[in-house]
Image (cartoon, rainbow, N blue to C red):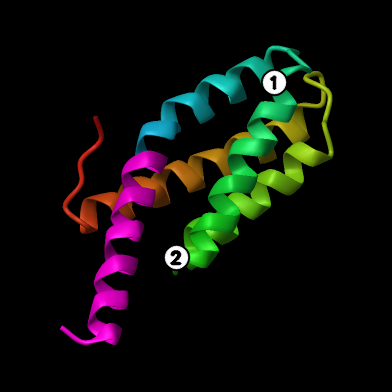
Amino acid sequence: MSNESDMQERLRQLGAQFLQRTLGEVASLQSLLSRVKGGDTAAYGNLQHLAHRMHGTGATLGFGTISELAGELEQLVEDKPAASDTASMERLNQAALRLVAEVQAQAKSSGLEPG
């Protein structure tokens, strides 16, 4: 195998690991979102960190849509809307739903299934 082939294979492996890990983190994301919607302000930091990691790693490994959606979620969380702000909470919820759906679709197309 050439160095280029080795690198492509390594990137493929890293991409599969990212999808597997991110698929597993979907439950955490949904739990953190529920806590935020319930008024748990401490959950904002964890949710933002999770979205930030998905955003950056997704971009690095070529998962542009996951990265974009995670970046959108990250920005919405960064604004720390109050749980009583129903419009902001709905935007946050919709962003999370789109991200989860994209992660699941990418994982399925790669032969991975939700655990």
* Whether residue 101 is situated above or below residue 26 in the rendered picture: below
Mark 1 or 2: in front is: 2
Residue lying at 55% horizontally and 39% vertically, measured from the top left: 96
User: In the rendered image, which residue does mark 1 sit on?
Assistant: 43
**Residue 89 location in percent, x, y?**
71, 30
Indicate left or right for 90 with 58 as reference.
right
Q: Secondary structure at mark 2?
A: loop
How far is mark 1 from mark 2, CA to CA? 27 Å
* Whether residue 53 is situated above or below residue 93 in the rendered picture: below
Residue lying at 41% horizontally and 52% vertically, measured from the top left: 102
Residue lying at 59% horizontally and 54% vertically, measured from the top left: 55
**Residue 97 location in percent, x, y?**
50, 40
User: In the rendered image, which residue does mark 2 sit on?
Assistant: 61
Amino acid on which the number 1 mark rests in the picture: Ala
Asked whether residue 8 is drawn in magenta, I would say yes
Crowding at dot 2, Cα within 10 Å, few <14 / some 14-19 / many 20+, comes out as: some
Q: Which residues are magenta?
A: 1-22
Viewer-side residue, 108 vs 7? 7
- Disc tally is 2
Asked whether residue 39 is drawn in magenta, I would say no
